[in-house]
Amino acid sequence: MSEDDDRPTLTVVADNPQPKRNERLAQQYFNDALLQLAANIIRVVRGAGKPYELILQCNDVVTTAIEVRDATGNMPSDATVANLLLLEREEIEDYHSFRGGKKLAMHRMVKGGLQFAASRLLHQQLQIQQGEREMEDAFDELERLHEERRKQREAEARADRAKALPKRKPAKRKPRKPKSEGFL
Protein backbone atom coordinates (compact mmCIF):
# COMPACT_ATOMS: atom_id res chain seq x y z
CA MET A 1 0.00 0.00 0.00
CA SER A 2 1.46 3.29 -0.99
CA GLU A 3 0.98 6.70 0.52
CA ASP A 4 -1.12 7.75 -2.45
CA ASP A 5 -3.75 5.15 -1.60
CA ASP A 6 -4.24 6.59 1.91
CA ARG A 7 -4.94 10.11 0.72
CA PRO A 8 -8.51 11.13 0.00
CA THR A 9 -9.32 11.81 -3.58
CA LEU A 10 -9.78 15.50 -4.23
CA THR A 11 -12.01 16.72 -6.96
CA VAL A 12 -11.57 20.24 -8.21
CA VAL A 13 -14.81 21.93 -8.99
CA ALA A 14 -14.20 24.92 -11.18
CA ASP A 15 -16.88 27.51 -11.31
CA ASN A 16 -16.17 30.37 -13.60
CA PRO A 17 -17.15 33.41 -11.56
CA GLN A 18 -16.68 35.71 -14.56
CA PRO A 19 -20.33 35.60 -15.77
CA LYS A 20 -21.60 36.39 -12.26
CA ARG A 21 -19.06 39.16 -11.95
CA ASN A 22 -20.20 40.56 -15.31
CA GLU A 23 -23.85 40.45 -14.16
CA ARG A 24 -23.07 42.31 -10.94
CA LEU A 25 -20.93 44.86 -12.76
CA ALA A 26 -23.59 45.47 -15.43
CA GLN A 27 -26.27 45.86 -12.74
CA GLN A 28 -24.08 48.31 -10.82
CA TYR A 29 -23.45 50.39 -13.95
CA PHE A 30 -27.19 50.45 -14.64
CA ASN A 31 -27.98 51.44 -11.03
CA ASP A 32 -25.43 54.26 -11.11
CA ALA A 33 -26.65 55.56 -14.48
CA LEU A 34 -30.30 55.52 -13.38
CA LEU A 35 -29.58 57.28 -10.08
CA GLN A 36 -27.48 59.94 -11.83
CA LEU A 37 -30.30 60.57 -14.31
CA ALA A 38 -33.00 60.70 -11.63
CA ALA A 39 -31.01 63.06 -9.41
CA ASN A 40 -30.22 65.37 -12.31
CA ILE A 41 -33.86 65.48 -13.43
CA ILE A 42 -34.94 66.45 -9.92
CA ARG A 43 -32.27 69.14 -9.77
CA VAL A 44 -33.20 70.50 -13.20
CA VAL A 45 -36.87 70.65 -12.16
CA ARG A 46 -35.94 72.74 -9.13
CA GLY A 47 -33.89 75.12 -11.25
CA ALA A 48 -30.40 73.71 -10.82
CA GLY A 49 -28.80 70.59 -12.23
CA LYS A 50 -27.26 70.03 -15.62
CA PRO A 51 -29.93 70.03 -18.33
CA TYR A 52 -27.26 69.64 -21.02
CA GLU A 53 -26.41 66.18 -19.63
CA LEU A 54 -29.96 64.77 -19.56
CA ILE A 55 -29.97 63.22 -23.05
CA LEU A 56 -26.54 61.64 -22.53
CA GLN A 57 -27.67 60.29 -19.16
CA CYS A 58 -30.83 58.83 -20.75
CA ASN A 59 -28.60 57.13 -23.32
CA ASP A 60 -26.39 55.75 -20.52
CA VAL A 61 -29.43 54.27 -18.78
CA VAL A 62 -30.60 52.54 -21.97
CA THR A 63 -27.10 51.33 -22.84
CA THR A 64 -26.47 49.91 -19.36
CA ALA A 65 -29.94 48.30 -19.29
CA ILE A 66 -29.02 46.49 -22.54
CA GLU A 67 -25.74 45.41 -20.93
CA VAL A 68 -27.74 43.96 -18.01
CA ARG A 69 -29.94 42.10 -20.50
CA ASP A 70 -26.88 40.75 -22.33
CA ALA A 71 -25.28 39.60 -19.05
CA THR A 72 -28.40 38.17 -17.37
CA GLY A 73 -30.81 37.45 -20.19
CA ASN A 74 -33.36 39.91 -18.74
CA MET A 75 -33.83 43.63 -18.67
CA PRO A 76 -33.72 45.24 -15.20
CA SER A 77 -37.03 44.53 -13.50
CA ASP A 78 -39.68 47.08 -12.55
CA ALA A 79 -39.07 46.16 -8.90
CA THR A 80 -35.34 46.82 -9.27
CA VAL A 81 -36.01 50.25 -10.76
CA ALA A 82 -38.69 51.11 -8.18
CA ASN A 83 -36.57 50.01 -5.22
CA LEU A 84 -33.56 51.86 -6.54
CA LEU A 85 -35.47 55.15 -6.88
CA LEU A 86 -37.56 54.83 -3.73
CA LEU A 87 -36.81 57.48 -1.12
CA GLU A 88 -36.41 55.44 2.00
CA ARG A 89 -37.27 56.90 5.35
CA GLU A 90 -34.41 57.58 7.64
CA GLU A 91 -34.17 55.10 10.44
CA ILE A 92 -35.97 56.56 13.44
CA GLU A 93 -35.36 55.08 16.86
CA ASP A 94 -37.94 57.06 18.82
CA TYR A 95 -40.99 58.18 16.89
CA HIS A 96 -42.30 60.10 19.90
CA SER A 97 -39.24 62.27 20.34
CA PHE A 98 -38.85 65.71 18.81
CA ARG A 99 -36.10 64.48 16.49
CA GLY A 100 -38.14 61.46 15.34
CA GLY A 101 -41.24 63.56 14.71
CA LYS A 102 -39.17 66.12 12.83
CA LYS A 103 -37.67 63.45 10.56
CA LEU A 104 -41.13 62.06 9.79
CA ALA A 105 -42.51 65.52 9.01
CA MET A 106 -39.54 66.34 6.76
CA HIS A 107 -39.98 63.06 4.89
CA ARG A 108 -43.66 63.87 4.32
CA MET A 109 -42.73 67.36 3.10
CA VAL A 110 -40.29 65.93 0.57
CA LYS A 111 -42.82 63.39 -0.68
CA GLY A 112 -45.46 66.08 -0.99
CA GLY A 113 -43.01 68.38 -2.74
CA LEU A 114 -42.08 65.72 -5.27
CA GLN A 115 -45.75 64.98 -5.94
CA PHE A 116 -46.43 68.68 -6.31
CA ALA A 117 -43.52 69.19 -8.73
CA ALA A 118 -44.30 66.15 -10.89
CA SER A 119 -47.99 67.08 -11.04
CA ARG A 120 -47.19 70.67 -11.96
CA LEU A 121 -45.11 69.45 -14.90
CA LEU A 122 -48.14 67.51 -16.19
CA HIS A 123 -50.77 70.10 -15.13
CA GLN A 124 -52.62 67.54 -12.96
CA GLN A 125 -54.63 69.79 -10.69
CA LEU A 126 -55.94 67.14 -8.26
CA GLN A 127 -52.47 65.72 -7.71
CA ILE A 128 -51.05 69.23 -7.31
CA GLN A 129 -53.58 69.87 -4.54
CA GLN A 130 -52.77 66.53 -2.90
CA GLY A 131 -49.05 67.37 -2.91
CA GLU A 132 -49.78 70.82 -1.43
CA ARG A 133 -51.98 69.28 1.26
CA GLU A 134 -49.30 66.75 2.19
CA MET A 135 -46.66 69.48 2.46
CA GLU A 136 -48.97 71.74 4.51
CA ASP A 137 -49.95 68.91 6.88
CA ALA A 138 -46.29 68.07 7.43
CA PHE A 139 -45.46 71.76 7.96
CA ASP A 140 -48.28 72.05 10.52
CA GLU A 141 -46.96 68.97 12.31
CA LEU A 142 -43.47 70.47 12.36
CA GLU A 143 -44.82 73.74 13.79
CA ARG A 144 -46.75 71.80 16.46
CA LEU A 145 -43.57 69.92 17.42
CA HIS A 146 -41.60 73.18 17.69
CA GLU A 147 -44.35 74.78 19.79
CA GLU A 148 -44.40 71.79 22.16
CA ARG A 149 -40.63 71.94 22.44
CA ARG A 150 -40.73 75.72 23.12
CA LYS A 151 -43.32 75.24 25.89
CA GLN A 152 -41.29 72.41 27.40
CA ARG A 153 -38.15 74.56 27.44
CA GLU A 154 -40.03 77.48 29.03
CA ALA A 155 -41.38 75.17 31.73
CA GLU A 156 -37.89 73.82 32.38
CA ALA A 157 -36.47 77.36 32.56
CA ARG A 158 -39.18 78.39 35.06
CA ALA A 159 -38.43 75.33 37.15
CA ASP A 160 -34.70 76.08 37.07
CA ARG A 161 -35.30 79.70 38.10
CA ALA A 162 -37.53 78.57 40.94
CA LYS A 163 -34.82 76.21 42.19
CA ALA A 164 -32.18 78.93 42.00
CA LEU A 165 -34.09 81.44 44.15
CA PRO A 166 -33.49 81.19 47.88
CA LYS A 167 -36.51 80.07 49.81
CA ARG A 168 -38.10 82.85 51.74
CA LYS A 169 -39.75 82.35 55.03
CA PRO A 170 -43.21 83.76 55.27
CA ALA A 171 -43.27 87.12 57.02
CA LYS A 172 -44.64 87.08 60.54
CA ARG A 173 -47.59 89.34 60.92
CA LYS A 174 -48.35 91.29 63.97
CA PRO A 175 -51.72 90.59 65.41
CA ARG A 176 -54.23 93.29 64.74
CA LYS A 177 -55.39 95.47 67.51
CA PRO A 178 -59.09 95.35 67.96
CA LYS A 179 -60.83 98.52 66.88
CA SER A 180 -62.21 100.51 69.65
CA GLU A 181 -65.94 100.92 69.54
CA GLY A 182 -66.18 104.49 70.39
CA PHE A 183 -65.26 106.84 73.18
CA LEU A 184 -66.07 106.12 76.77
Image: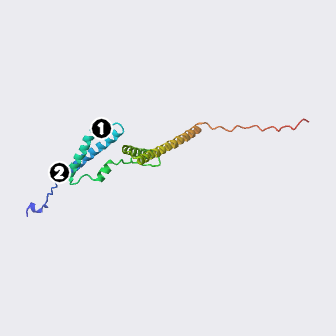
Residue 89 falls left or right of residue 166: left
Q: Is residue 58 visible?
A: yes
As shown in the figure, which amino acid type bears the numbered disc 2?
Answer: Gln
Residue at the extreme left: 2
Task: Give percent across and percent down for residue 69.
Answer: 21, 52
Mark number for residue 18?
Answer: 2
**What's the amino acid at mark 1?**
Pro
Q: Secondary structure at mark 1?
A: helix
How would you rate the neighbour count of disc 2 (Cα within 10 Å): few for under 14, some for 14-19, many for 20 or more?
Answer: few
List the single residue furthest toward the right: 184
Residue in view at x 52 percent, y 43 percent = 148
**Badge 2 element:** helix
Q: Say whether residue 92 is visible.
A: no
* Residue with the mark numbered 1: 51
The tag on residue 19 is: none
126 to the left or right of 159: left
Q: Residue 32 occupies which quadrant of the picture?
A: top left
* Towards the viewer: 75 or 142: 75
Q: Quadrant of the C terminus?
A: top right
Between the C-alphas of marks 2 and 1, the distance is 37 Å
- Residue 184 against residue 75 in the figure, above or below: above
Quadrant containing the N terminus is bottom left
Q: Is the residue under label 1 in contact with that under label 2 (CB below 8 Å)?
A: no
How far from the left and from the top, in percent, is residue 72? 21, 53
- Count of numbered circles in the view: 2
Residue 163 appears at what percent x and percent y? 58, 39
Instruction: Farthest residue to the bottom: give it.
Output: 1
Is the image coloured rainbow, by chain, by secondary structure, or in one colour? rainbow
Depth check, mark 2 against mark 1: the one in front is 1
Query: Which sits earlier in the primary sequence, circle 2 or circle 1?
Result: 2
Identify the residue at image location x=31%, y=44%.
38
Q: Residue at x 28, y 45 (%)?
A: 34
